[in-house]
Image (spheres, rainbow, N blue to C red):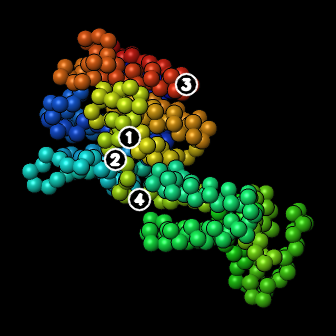
Amino acid sequence: MNSLYIMDAENCLNLLPIDCFQTIYIDPPYNTKSKDFEYLDDYNDWVDFIEPKIKKAYDLLQETGVCFVSIDDNKLIELRVVCNKIFGKENFIGMFITRQATRSNAKHINTIHEYVVVFAKNKKKAPRFEINRLDIAFYSDKLRPLMNEIKGEFKKNGTCSANELLKIRLKDFENDEHFSFLKNYSIVDGQGEICFATDLSVPSKSPKELYIDDIMLYLPALPSRGWSSKEKFIKLFHENKLIFKQGRPYEKHLLRESKDNAMSILSFYSRQGKHDLQKLGLGDIFSTAKPVDMIKYFIKISQISKEDKILDFFAGSGTTAQAVLECNLEDDGQREFILCQIDEPINPKSKAKKYLNHANSTIADITILRLEKLKEKFIFDYNIVYNAQE
């Protein structure tokens, strides 16, 4: 299904199946009137331009689906009004704030941020926006070295020594509010994994013993608490999620599976998008490319499965394609992307011209060039669909 549609967004969206996509990302022109971008950023009536596209995005989302739209202060209010009208206020999930630069040219307030407005097709059915902490570089950069050190100590000197080292290392995080959750992870299990344990009993007026012959586990009655169900013990046993302390079973929660809810202020620096292009040898080809890691983050917090379909109908430099491919590589997923990019002439003053071979190159040629660069790194196929309605 991976495809690039080279045509006007309305034509592209009319060709796509409704109720199909789990995640839609939109990075439209902000209508800043700037003459410096590779693309047109000057529309007489921006609302008339964006509203039919938002309406089609709503139609294309499946019932659990989520739409992310990047914008700045210039058109934030208009975008919210349009989205409220189409999605309904009750399906507004929230707004992310991203860092755009260190300084701006504003006369009064040094504006260094942008927004990502988020709406669900049906908020009650949308994902919880949880993400594994190890999928966030901010956490991963500190947690992975800690986990590797503790596992190394476990392999060399055993569980007791690893637990003692963990107590020492956790003190390094005591005053960091971002890592306050770590205080719970104070145990090293029988595989050298950092974890914490939760009780498997509940208050009861008539406590009973529990014998589970499926897993040969006998639990004597407690004074004032009853045990969780047999089914839960069997499930945890087969998932290797039982841990025993002083002969009593607890549910094990691994640090490597630790999740966090999405925060409204993102640590992604918007200009990282240029660095992503530089790694492909395309550093100056697109001045407003979004960071790959940011789009990966949106895909993961909104995903229902690793086979989700993702749509971007202002494809630009093709960041979303790279984000999907990297997500699949990291978790063996089978996600698919569809990109749409109008065959719009590139601003002749743009630096993008030096990367393309012909004088009449368009924004879609930039998208194709990135896709071809990505094919050198990833094994994937994609189709190009030209304007079938012309």
Label 1 belongs to which residue?
Answer: 291
Within-10-Å neighbours for mark 2: few <14, some 14–19, many 20+: some
Q: Residue at x 46, y 33 (%)?
A: 322
- Residue 250 visible in this rendered orientation of the protein: yes
- Please state which of residues 104 and 365 is positioned toward the viewer in this rendering: 104
Asked if the residue under mark 3 is in contact with the one under mark 4, i.e. CB atoms within 8 Å, the reply is: no
| CA distance for labels 1 and 2 | 7 Å
Q: Return the mark for residue 263.
A: 4
- Please give the residue where the numbered disc 2 appears in the rendered image: 269
Look at label 4 and name its amino acid: Met
Lower sequence index among marks 1 and 3 = 1
User: SS at mark 1?
Assistant: loop
Q: Which mark is residue 380?
A: 3
Instruction: Give the amino acid type for the residue marked by disc 1 in the picture.
Output: Pro
Tell me whether circle 1 and circle 2 mark residues in contact (CB < 8 Å): yes
Could you tell which of marks 1 and 4 lies nearer the N-terminus? 4
